[in-house]
Amino acid sequence: MKKFFLYLILLIVLIQFIRPNKNSSEQVSKNGIQTEVTVPENIQSILDRSCNDCHSNNTNYDWYHEIVPFSWVVASHVKEGKEHINFDEWITYNKDQKEHIIEELEEVIESREMPLVGYLKFHPEAIISDEDNNKLLDWIRTLEE
Ligand code: HEC
């Protein structure tokens, strides 16, 4: 039994070396949504606070994100999130992709699917008030035009 725990601890230490790449870009993106459509300041701050950890080229990491398994969970959220929408790569999408993304945006904000519930437990500041959710929805609808 003692040996088992020893191996377990060794394993936990060893897996710490399997580090996923960080999602951080030094520059302000040239492909960002702001370069194409108007993003009012209050909307930008909602996106920064509640979405951009997983849907941009820059994640704000906390200290515990260095530790396995948290580092893996964050990396997988970021990878998956960016596959659906990356606000920093907006102008690289074609017209159909944009239309599809805008539809999805409307859906997830209307149904309050985003941000992910698990994320909100660790980031209560990312919870979107009803008022902000409506503002975000109004803004998304302006993108449809
Ligand atoms: C903790 C990371 C995280 C945060 C924060 C987050 N998302 Fe996501 N998002 C994901 C992941 C992972 C997926 C893909 C899996 C899924 O649909 O659950 C996703 C999917 C989406 C999709 C596609 C939905 C679909 O039906 O396929 C949209 C649109 C989206 N997110 C918008 C947002 C918006 C807007 C915000 C902020 C209000 C936000 N997300 C915050 C991780 C995140």
Image: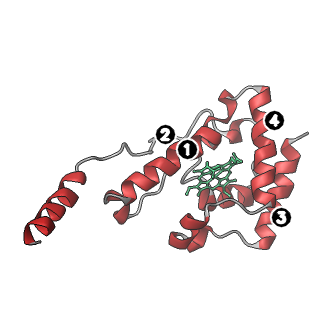
Position in image of residue 62 (x %, y %): 40, 63
Residue type marked 3:
Asn
Outermost residue on the front side: it is: 1
Q: Residues within 10 Å of mark 2 (few under 14, many from 20)?
A: few
**CB at disc 1 and ligand 1 closer than 8 Å:** yes
- For the residues carrying marks 3 and 4, which lies nearer the camera in this image? 4
Circle 2 sits on which residue? 27
Say whether disc 4 or disc 2 marks the residue closer to the N-terminus. 2
Q: Label 4 belongs to which residue?
A: 99
Read off the residue under disc 3. Answer: 134
Label 1 vs 2, first from the N-terminus: 2
Kind of residue at badge 2: Gln
Distance from disc 2 to disc 3, alpha carbons, whole Å, reads: 31 Å
**Label 1: which residue?**
80
Q: In the image, 37: left or right of 58?
A: right
In this rendered view, identify the residue nearer to me: 68 or 38: 68
In the rendered view of the protein, which quadrant contains the C terminus? top right
Tell us which disc is closer to us: 2 or 3. 3
